[in-house]
Image (tube, coloured by chain):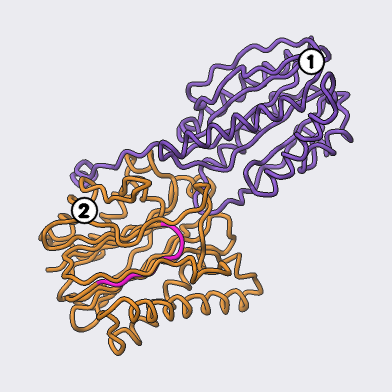
Chain colours: A purple, B orange
Amino acid sequence: MNNLADAVEFAENPEPRCPCVLLVDVSGSMQGAPIAALNEGLRAFKNDLARDALAARRVEVAIVTFGSDVQVVQDFVTADLFEPPVLTAEGSTIMGTAIHQALDLLQARKTQYRTNGVAYYRPWVFLITDGEPQGEEPHVIEQAAQRIRDEEGSKRVAFFAVGVENANMDRLRSIVVRTPVRLIGLNFVEMFVWLSRSTQAVSHSKVDEQVALPPPGWGTV
Amino acid sequence: MAKEKKATQPLSTWQTIGASVAGASHLKTDTPCQDAHALAELPGGLLIIVVSDGAGSAPLADVGAQTAVSAAMEYLRKYLPTFDPFNESEEAQAFLTRVLQAARNAVEEEAENRSATPRELAATLIVLAVNARAAIAAQIGDGASVLQDGAGQLKAFTAPQQGEYVNETTFLISPDYLKAAQFRFERGSFTHVALFSDGLQRLALKLPEAEPHAPFFTPLFGFVTQASEASAEERNQQLATFLQSPRIAERADDDLTLVLAARR
């Protein structure tokens, strides 16, 4: 039977992708301990994903930061090739513009997947903030919130929000559909390990879209 | 948990092997194998094969898959020889629709017996029958079936059926299951048949065109036909061992089912 295992060749299909955008608040208030803890969390995220060979080839990470401007710090890359950046914090909190940027990025990525015949899972956005929208016109965040509602409604995205320290949780609740979670202390490492495990679970799922996520031990609702 | 179909009668026209094995991810989480399959040869060189893949998220998926397979097999054994739906497409579809309905009814009934919702028994279903004149098949959800004709031409008879996202599919218990089902009818004398669950489809087919990958099928079909002193059970076990080999586990961590048949 070893002969059979050697004789049979497999079709070469690209691995299906599970895209995940980290949408990170790098406004001035994140300076110091919070941004340092977040950077450590990013490294833990990378290391934990790398332990799962299949997930490392399927989970794609992109990082969009927002302070006084919005930057795509990391365009989509599979977890095995992801090199965690070191983020620095300053400026205000143009969250609405950043949400649009993240959703645009996902839309473009899905188009690329389809053009290249790559199957994919429902994308995730993971918004991390310690404040509330600032420094942009009110309609920008209103439109962004509406877009989240539309895209969640049509299952185009799963949009999660995490509040750090003094984040305005009421304001966050008005922006995202899913209940935001408040991070306990600066436990970013635990949060990112959870995110890694959750995306691993999704990237291994095959026949149904409902994947039970492990309970977040790092936050409170 | 490897589950193989035991050959209960000497097969005259067809040589067959089949295996369902738990995937690496199921072994990690201690989930049972949620795939099921069965096959039989009826008089007149009529071969029937049924494969079902229980939904990973459904708690009673293994029960759902086994119930669907048993019910479809029972219906086929009982009515296929009488109806002989191998003459034209409409008649094949009408017959296969009744097979799917019988399987769905059985799953709904089993859910009720267990005070569960049908959703908890969610599973896909592929049903295929072939005689000397034609092949017919129906499929709900992903997985696929492949035919090879006398000239050695491979074709996907039914193909994986997916939504926008790779982990979405339709199940036998879905409300629109008959609308979502694929029905196939093809005249011809087919020499080889393969059915497999979605765990293998990325290795066996070039996607998204669903074109059978010949270097995958040729050695496997060769294995079915090759003379062997091994019993049917031993050969099924050999296939199960192949499905659990590291090369496959590396590329596919889901439950795997593969059923192969070759005309003598």
Instruction: Give x and y (percent) for residue A121.
Output: 54, 42
Left or right: residue A49 compared with residue B95? right
Local SS, label 2: helix
Question: In the image, is A86 to the left or to the right of A205?
Answer: right
Residue found at x 71% / y 22%: A24
Q: Disc 2 residue type?
A: Leu
Q: What chain does badge 1 belong to? A: A
Q: What residue would you read off at disc 2?
A: B220
Which residue is painted at 41% across and 53% down in the image? B198
Q: Residues within 10 Å of mark 2 (few under 14, many from 20)?
A: many
Whether labels 2 and 1 belong to a single chain: the reply is: no
Asked whether A30 falls inside the magenta stretch, the response is no
Please state which of residues B223 and A14 is positioned toward the viewer in this rendering: A14
Residue B15 against residue A162 in the figure, above or below = below
Q: Which residues are magenta?
A: B135-142
Output the chain of dot 2.
B
What's the mark number on residue A27?
A: 1
Residue B161 image offset from top left, x and y in percent? 44, 57
Residue sitting at x 28%, y 42%: A10
Amino acid type, callout 1: Ser
Q: Give the CA separation, mark 2 to mark 1.
A: 59 Å
The quarter of the rendered structure image containing the N terminus of chain B is bottom left
